[in-house]
Image (cartoon, coloured by chain):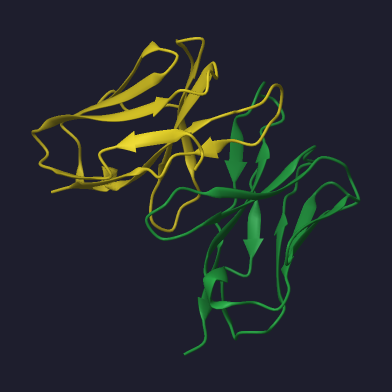
Chain colours: A green, B yellow
Amino acid sequence: GQQLNQSPQSMFIQEGEDVSMNCTSSSIFNTWLWYKQDPGEGPVLLIALYKAGELTSNGRLTAQFGITRKDSFLNISASIPSDVGIYFCAGPLIKAAGNKLTFGGGTRVLVKP
Amino acid sequence: ETGVTQTPRHLVMGMTNKKSLKCEQHLGHNAMYWYKQSAKKPLELMFVYSLEERVENNSVPSRFSPECPNSSHLFLHLHTLQPEDSALYLCAIPPGQGVSPLHFGNGTRLTVT
């Protein structure tokens, strides 16, 4: 089906480190979206990707639309404490019109104790 | 600020209660969505309203009853819920045409006791 698998499920960061996470599917997606959710809030869009191979940045965030259209990657450079939260990938359901998105299970980013 | 306002932010209800969740947007968009976010599960699409008509109902139990009286307001009426219905309920709108990323409200954290 059109499930999205995110890896890793959780990770610890230390300030200044670069962080990477990915999202894969057995199905092709034509759009990849990355969201971040802080505690007590709804997901907020970080980056939208619309073309295979596309590499897009938003500040310290960089995301890539995999060339196979079955995966996407999100990188955070020089992480800071406010980067903690849950990062979700999402894409539109192929057989559905409009904006009905399917979401991955999320990557929870935590600060190293 | 996504322009999507949800109330209340937190709700605790017994299994025999009847309550309603409210979502409000004044951005003039024609579609509104209800998503459910449970612990350790991906966001699940519940209902889609387009031009105030329900266009999708993803096998949601009848104890959840949506209502869209106008293009600015969306309700989710709750009755005889179960403890497993405890979750974060998110309202979302697609601000653009075609496949555009959804913008979410901050959700209502529901606890069923």
- In the rendered image, the residue lying farthest to the bottom is A113
- Residue B41: image x %, image y %? 46, 53
- Please report the residue visible at 63 percent of the width from the left and 28 percent of the height from the top: A99
Residue B18, above or below A41: above
Image quarter of residue B89: top left
Residue B79, above or below A25: above
Image quarter of residue B18: top left
- Residue B107: image x %, image y %? 37, 43
Residue B109 placement, left or right of B43: left
- Please report the residue visible at 46 percent of the width from the left and 59 percent of the height from the top: A38
Residue A52 placement, left or right of B12: right
Residue A46 placement, left or right of A58: left
Residue B60 shows in this picture: no
- Residue A15: image x %, image y %? 61, 84
- Please report the residue visible at 69 percent of the width from the left and 21 percent of the height from the top: B97
Label tally: 0
Residue A95, above or below B45: above
Residue B69, above or below A73: above
Residue A24 shows in this picture: yes
